[in-house]
Image (cartoon, rainbow, N blue to C red):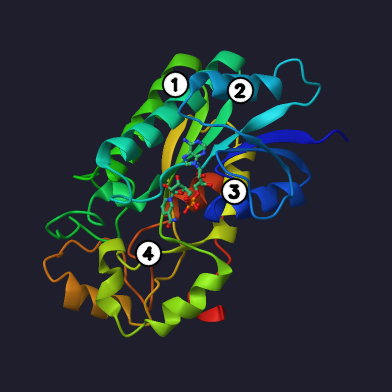
């Protein structure tokens, strides 16, 4: 059977490498679009600056129109992945325009499914100059997104851009509000810093293993009829060794609206919608990793 083709952006990055690997293992022909080459070559990489619509259009049309292979979709993970590493305008422009270009070119070329990397940072707590508590817990997709930083703003804008293209073309665009992404080598250091509990307060101790991000991407590309949806992609458990209820009592005492039981080390950002819509289950648990 002929392989299906998938375009992955940011496939040279931390999460992207695992996404590329997962699609290759699942018999996809993967094309990676990134400004830099990957550390390990397991698929074709086309060096592409996604800030340039001409390059995006050229790269996508080269691998979609006239090709005998069906393009299953685009997994767009390329971005500046946090606030304040670049000037605000550079972060905003890179993340917003790269996403706009991907969606514009996909629409023009008739590519019907896109996955976007959004972030739990879009809720605004992570990079706020003054810490603020969530309005309720666990946070879900209905919780207001209140960023003051240009990174969080770029993710909110991208989700709105996704809705716009869905209205324009019917394209399925699933935006993943990702927790802090951990790769296998992250766990040892995270565990060595368990005593510094407050260090991960701003991300509400959320995390997601990059391998679980990869399985969610495949599920979202293979799903049908989702329209434009934002989904929290987080592990079931938190990235702290403390009980979640204890964390809330100590660090988030103003949050009185608790909407589901906070048993054990359960996550404070809810993955229930992603599980329901994608039939996805995260496999990796913090305490089982070395
Ligand atoms: N790392 C996290 O904890 C985290 C959490 C939530 C969301 N995210 C999102 O997940 C995605 C991947 O994050 P990551 O940690 O793997 O980041 P990363 O920096 O490791 O990888 C991003 C890749 O995108 C490429 N890139 C950036 N701008 C580009 C452009 N204009 N054109 C082409 N390539 C470009 C970079 O070269 C890099 O290889 C990002 O969208 C990020 O915002 C990450």
CA gap between label 3 and label 1 equals 26 Å
Q: CA distance from mark 1 to mark 4?
A: 30 Å
Residue appearing at x 35%, y 75% in the figure: 263
Helix or strand or loop: what does disc 3 sit on? loop
Q: So how many labels did they put on this image?
A: 4
User: Is residue 55 found left or right of 241 in the rendered image?
Assistant: right
Element carrying mark 1: helix
| Mark-to-mark CA distance, 3 and 4 | 24 Å
- Name the residue tied to disc 2: 111
Which residue bears the numbered disc 3? 12
According to the picture, the residue beneath numbered tag 4 turns out to be 206
Q: Are the residues at dot 2 and dot 1 in contact (C-beta closer than 8 Å)?
A: no
Label annotation for residue 165: 1
Across and down, in percent, residue 152 comes to 29, 44
Q: Residues within 10 Å of mark 4 (few under 14, many from 20)?
A: many
Cα separation, mark 3 vs mark 2, equals 22 Å
The image position of residue 105, as x and y in percent, is: 54, 19
Q: Residue at x 76, y 15 (%)?
A: 66
Going from N to C along the chain, the mark reached first, 4 or 2, is 2
Sequence order check, earlier mark of 3 and 4: 3
């Amino acid at each position: 059977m002929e392989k299906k083709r998938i375009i992955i952006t940011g496939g040279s990055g931390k999460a992207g490498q695992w996404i590329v690997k997962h699609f290759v293992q699942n018999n996809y022909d993967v094309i990676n679009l990134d400004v830099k080459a990957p550390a390990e070559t397991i698929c074709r990489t086309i060096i592409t600056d996604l800030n340039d619509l001409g390059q995006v259009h050229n790269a996508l049309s080269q691998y979609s129109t006239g090709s005998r292979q069906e393009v299953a979709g685009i997994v767009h993970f390329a971005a500046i992945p946090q606030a304040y590493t670049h000037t605000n305008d550079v972060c905003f422009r890179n993340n917003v325009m790269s996403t706009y270009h991907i969606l514009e070119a996909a629409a023009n070329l008739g590519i019907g499914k896109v996955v976007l990397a959004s972030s739990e940072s879009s809720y605004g707590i992570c990079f706020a100059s003054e810490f603020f508590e969530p309005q309720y817990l666990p946070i879900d997709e209905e919780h207001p997104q209140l960023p003051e930083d240009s990174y969080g703003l770029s993710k909110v804008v991208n989700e709105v851009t996704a809705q716009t293209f869905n209205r324009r073309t019917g394209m399925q665009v699933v935006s993943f509000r990702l927790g802090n992404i951990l790769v296998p080598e992250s766990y040892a250091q995270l565990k060595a810093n368990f005593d510094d509990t407050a260090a991960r307060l701003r991300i509400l101790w959320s995390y997601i293993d990059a391998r679980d991000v990869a399985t969610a991407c495949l599920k979202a590309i293979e799903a049908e009829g989702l329209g434009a949806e934002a989904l929290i992609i987080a592990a079931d458990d938190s990235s702290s060794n403390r009980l979640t209820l204890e964390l809330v009592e100590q660090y988030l005492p103003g949050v009185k609206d608790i909407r589901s039981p906070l048993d054990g080390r359960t996550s404070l950002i809810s993955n229930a919608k992603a599980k329901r819509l994608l039939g996805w289950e995260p496999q990796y648990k913090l305490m089982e990793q070395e």
